Amino acid sequence: MAEEQVVISVADDQVDDMASVVAALREAGLRVAEVLDSVGVVTGTVDGDALGFLSTVPGVVEVERSREFQLPVPDEPTH
Amino acid sequence: MTAAADGTTGRYLVLFDDDWSNGTQELNRVAGIRTESSEDGGATPHLWEGDGLMMHELGVALVTADDDQVTALASAADEPGPIALIEPERFVRAIEPTDTVTEAAAAAVDETLFTWGLQAVGAPNSTATGKGVKLAVLDTGFDLTHPDFAGRTVVHESFVQGEEVQDGHGHGTHCIGTSSGPRDVEKGPGYGVAYEVDIYAGKVLSNEGSGADGGILAGINWAINSGCAVISMSLGAGTQPGQAYSRTFEKVATRALEKGTLIIAAAGNESDRRTGRIAPVGHPANCPSIMSVAAIDVARKIAYFSCGTVDTIGAIDLSGPGFDVYSSWPMPLRNKRISGTSMATPHAAGIAALIAQATGARGYELWARLSQKGLRLPLPSTDVGAGLVQAP
């Protein structure tokens, strides 16, 4: 099953102490890349079949696939 | 023939009633005017020969008349008879196309001292400098060796795996130049809005210009932790009309505002207004709590590529100079001109830093002051939001 890059937002009341939510996410299959404590976000990768269950973890409000960005090359007309 | 002050030629038009079969005789009887008739065969009568010309098909005569004759004809118009009206003949002229505002405005731009963008946002006349404010630019990094930034505070961090913050692309250096660069340069115009700000250069896009949400969020987190009042993000991903904004980025932006950090992002360049196509605001600028910036050109018209408010999801909040913007570039090129909403965004971010210094405003209050000060433009708010950002 394909691996997905995800960004996960935790509930407002969990932002100040994210440790328990992060542990629960790991239990649910998330391979944690970063815990962004000032914004209440956890980033990482997960197998495709576990993706749908991440949003059921207590304290999680949002699970999104990570979008890609690409700038035009320097000599293109717009930047 | 010279024009009278009221634009008339000195001759008169005489209008006849519907039955003008004896119009020529009537002109002669009433005022002693002898006219050529367009009915007569042979060469076309000239309008300026004789006392006048009877345009038989129209029921109108063009006549030369002195004051007495005009009085007689005016009386005849009031009485029953074929003469209905007499009025002065007017001069007319072709309607010339006006010079376009663009041509006039472009001719007036003088970039000897400052870029047109700095002038358009009122930066040179402002007493604010950005001193004491921390401004983060999340992009392709920065050329840490750039001579225009000698002596400046530059805090830097890379969030791109395997790459240092040193800018191998150029985009980041250009944006940092616009938001935070110098006003007084050895060669060329001054090009930086908040020229005394503390620069926080976060590399979230690779030297090839690519990145992902995770790296950008890590950069945002770092900037908030560092106490930055403003985060400038000249990056985005294209969206479709009706596409929902990212709830995660919206949540992050709200939390940032509550902690005193305003996130400002480029609206996107996916439009081509030359063919009538307006693209919706890109991700993440389409989040309500992220300030989105559109691009205007030197004539203060919307740039052809600038994304707009197309649905009820992503909206334009403000606009900035985004066409033909001169700024810094990695050495040895040193400086470069490029265009994009990527260039409008650091203008807005630099102005935000100036306002933050001048008023102490942060977060939501800073957003309010930016909008309040915006120069309203005679353009749709769907294209320019509250207008063109202005320095305090």
Image: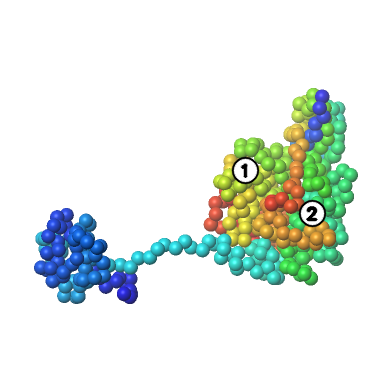
Q: Is residue B15 left or right of residue A3?
A: left
* Mark 2, secondary structure of its residue: loop
Q: Residue at x 69, y 65 (%)?
A: B115
Residue behind mark 2: B170
* Residue B260 rendering spot, x and y as whole percentages: 74, 52
Q: Nearer the viewer, residue B184 or B262?
A: B184
Q: Earlier in the sequence, mark 2 or mark 1?
A: 2
**What amino acid is found at the position of numbered circle 2 in the picture?**
Gly
In the orientation shown, which residue stands out farthest toward the front?
Answer: B42
Residue behind mark 1: B280
- Quarter holding residue B250: top right
* Residue A3 rendering spot, x and y as whole percentages: 82, 29
- Quarter holding residue A15: top right
**What amino acid is found at the position of numbered circle 1 in the picture?**
Pro
Image: B373 above or below B255: below
Closer to the observer: label 2 or label 1?
Answer: 2
Q: Residue at x 71, y 56 (%)?
A: B338
Q: Residue at x 70, y 70 (%)?
A: B113
Quadrant occupied by the N terminus of chain A = top right
Q: Residues within 10 Å of mark 1 (few under 14, many from 20)?
A: many
